[in-house]
Amino acid sequence: MKRHAEIQKLLAVYSGLDATERSAVDAHTRTCRACADRRAAYAEMDARLAALVDPAPPASLSKSLAHILHGEQSKARGRAATGDRRWSSRRVLVPAGLLLLLILSVWLIMRASTPVDHEIAQTPSVTPTSTPIALASPQEHHEIVSLELLSWLATRYPASPESGTAGYATAASPDERDSFPSTPAAFRPATLPVLSTVVAHR
Amino acid sequence: MAEGLASDETASLVAALFDQYRSAIFAYVWRLVGEREWAEELTQETFLRVFSARQQLAGVTNRRAWLYRIATNLCFNALRRRRRFAWLPWQVEQVPLLRAPDAAEQIGRRDAVESAFAALPPKYRAPLLLFAHYGFDISEVAEALAISEGAVKTRIYRAREMFREAYERENLK
């Protein structure tokens, strides 16, 4: 009886059976009248179902779908193109931004560690000073350089009894002394680089 | 999956599927949901889903089964939603027949087939329709309905029995 039930299920999908199943069903239906009738009924049913005429889709379906699909396709193309442009822009802008950031960072680090006046900081002192020049404030810097310059001028233009010329420190006349810078305060900050150069090339 | 296909190629595939299957899908959907306008909406939705998922097309081995699976899922979901929210019991609209100059007996028989077929629950109607009307094999039906081949055989057997009974009732009317 179980075999009979199994065969009936197989009969329902007879056209989809493999060769082994089909031969088993054929062997059974040769000896079973009920299954043979069922097989005939299913075959007739298949013929009727296969003959069903599919209703034609409305014209509006094709038009609206074509319109929508075309619109979607255009949108998709637009999105793809925008995506490509966005991607290519990103490929250029991101490294450029990173490079710019790197350059800026390096510049800021160098600026923070660089002395106020690099040339002055590297200039050997004529006279030792208690304040390292690289750490000096602009005012201290100004005074240090002025003192160094005065010291240099005093050694560069010493008093010469033979030639009868007065040194800077002992200039005979006020006019002669006025031709030299009289006091450290006379050196304006703007002249410092020039003076520093003079000291460095001394 | 569709890395080998350009977007134009996938769009062409969708267009080819639309041209080849729009009539069959519309008829299938109509026979499942039973209303022409609803079938039109769902058919439209089916192809829009296909278009949205077109990048998967290159990896699909059986495009017909894939297309019917989308349509079937949409129909079953739509029917479930309608049944859940409908105040009135759901009824299948009779699919109108193309009135070719058939003999009256043939017309009557076709009406009976349509009526008997419409009496089946969609769960059984779909596999029988795919197998007996559209010529899908068992594995294709299984793929289209996302069920096992054993389940397909069982459903088709039950569908046939329900159809046979309904058809006999129609003939007695």
Image (cartoon, helix red, strand yellow):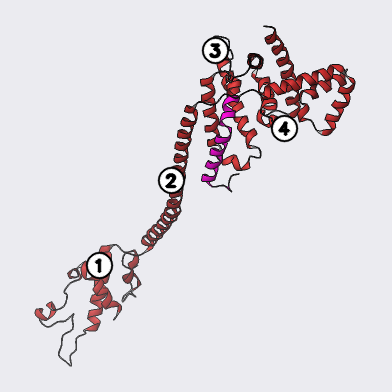
Residue type of the residue flagged with mark 2:
Thr
- The N terminus of chain A lies in which quarter of the figure? top right
Residue at image point 85% right, 26% down: A25
Q: Are marks 2 and 4 in contact (CB under 8 Å)?
A: no
Subunit under mark 4: B
Badge 1: how crowded within 10 Å, few (<14), some, or many (20+)? many
Give the CA separation, mark 2 to mark 1. 61 Å
Q: What SS does tag 4 mark?
A: helix
Q: Name the residue beneath numbered marker 2.
A: A82
Report whether mark 3 lies on the same chain as mark 1. no
Residue type of the residue flagged with mark 1:
His
Q: Are marks 4 and 3 in contact (CB under 8 Å)?
A: no
Q: What SS does tag 1 mark?
A: helix
Report whether mark 4 lies on the same chain as mark 3. yes
Q: What SS does tag 3 mark?
A: loop
Q: Name the residue beneath numbered marker 3.
A: B86
**In this rendering, would A154 be left or right of A10?**
left
Residue sitting nearer the eye, A173 or A201: A201
Span shown in magenta: B1-28
Q: Name the residue beneath numbered marker 1.
A: A142
Q: Are marks 3 and 1 in contact (CB under 8 Å)?
A: no
Subunit under mark 3: B
Residue type of the residue flagged with mark 4:
Ser
Determine which quarter of the picture holds residue A100.
Answer: bottom left
Say the numbered circle drawn on residue B23: none
**In this rendering, would A86 be left or right of A32?**
left
Q: Earlier in the sequence, mark 2 or mark 1?
A: 2
Determine whether B155 is above or below A184 in the image: above
Determine whether B64 is above or below B100 in the image: below
